Image (tube, rainbow, N blue to C red):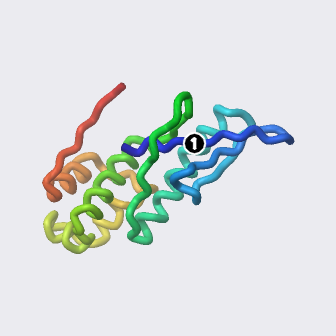
């Protein structure tokens, strides 16, 4: 759901720059392709956190072209972003989610903080409060 296509550009002075067509705020670089893609995960998570903090809808990843590399946030961040995306689609505000869960607002704020290591049971509870469930898959 959050596999974002990237554009890798070799730089004349060496290294690679990574850009996300769907998330223009996310840009990074690395000494080689592997390092650039590793840093791209952090750049993507940071950029998407700005959307969450600003209460904006998340960008939708476009379909990757043939052989185009993609980058996704870590599994925990994907789960958090999935909850945020569902809330946005359903028009549910943080205060309403807090009420449904019986939580205080700081708990809900931490749930959407991509730098906070939320517990999976909290994410599952939030999904349930939105009429959804969390699926975990190893591929």
Between 51 and 89, the one lying in front of the other is: 89
Residue shown at 64%/32% (left/top)? Answer: 34
Kindly identify which residue carries mark 1.
Answer: 6
In x, y percent, where is residue 4? 48, 44
Q: Residue furthest top?
A: 139
State the image quarter where residue 84 is shown: bottom left
Residue appearing at x 53%, y 30% in the figure: 66
Counting from the top left corner in percent of width and height, residue 11 is at: 79, 41
Q: Secondary structure at mark 1?
A: loop
Number of dots carrying numbers: 1
Up the image or down, 68 lies above or below 117; here it is above
Q: Is residue 133 left or right of residue 71?
A: left
Which quarter shows the N terminus?
top left
| Farthest residue, direction right | 13
- Examine the rendered structure and indicate whether residue 81 appears above or below residue 110: above
The relative height of residue 78 versus residue 48 in the rendered view (above or below) is: above
Image location of residue 126, percent across then percent down = 21, 56
Q: Position of residue 75 (x, y in %)?
A: 38, 41
- Name the residue located 84 percent from the left edge and 40 percent from the top edge: 12
Residue found 26% across the figure and 61% down from its top: 89
- In the figure, is residue 117 to the left or right of 47? left
Crowding around mark 1 (Cα neighbors within 10 Å: few <14, some 14 to 19, many 20+) is many
Q: Quadrant of the C terminus?
A: top left
In this rendering, position of residue 72 left or right of residue 83: right
Quadrant housing residue 55: bottom left
């Amino acid at each position: 759901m959050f596999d974002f296509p990237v554009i890798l550009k070799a730089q004349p002075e060496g290294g690679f720059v990574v850009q996300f067509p769907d998330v223009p705020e996310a840009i990074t670089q690395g000494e080689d392709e592997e390092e650039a893609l590793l840093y791209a995960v952090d750049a993507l998570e940071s950029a998407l956190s700005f959307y969450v903090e600003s209460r904006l809808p998340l960008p939708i990843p476009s379909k990757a072209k043939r052989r185009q590399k993609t980058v996704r946030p870590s599994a925990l961040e994907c789960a958090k972003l999935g909850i945020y995306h569902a809330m946005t689609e359903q028009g549910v505000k943080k205060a309403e989610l807090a009420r449904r869960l019986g939580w205080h607002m700081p708990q809900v704020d931490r749930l959407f903080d991509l730098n906070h290591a939320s517990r999976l049971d909290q994410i599952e509870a939030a999904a349930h409060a939105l009429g959804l469930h969390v699926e975990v898959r190893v591929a």
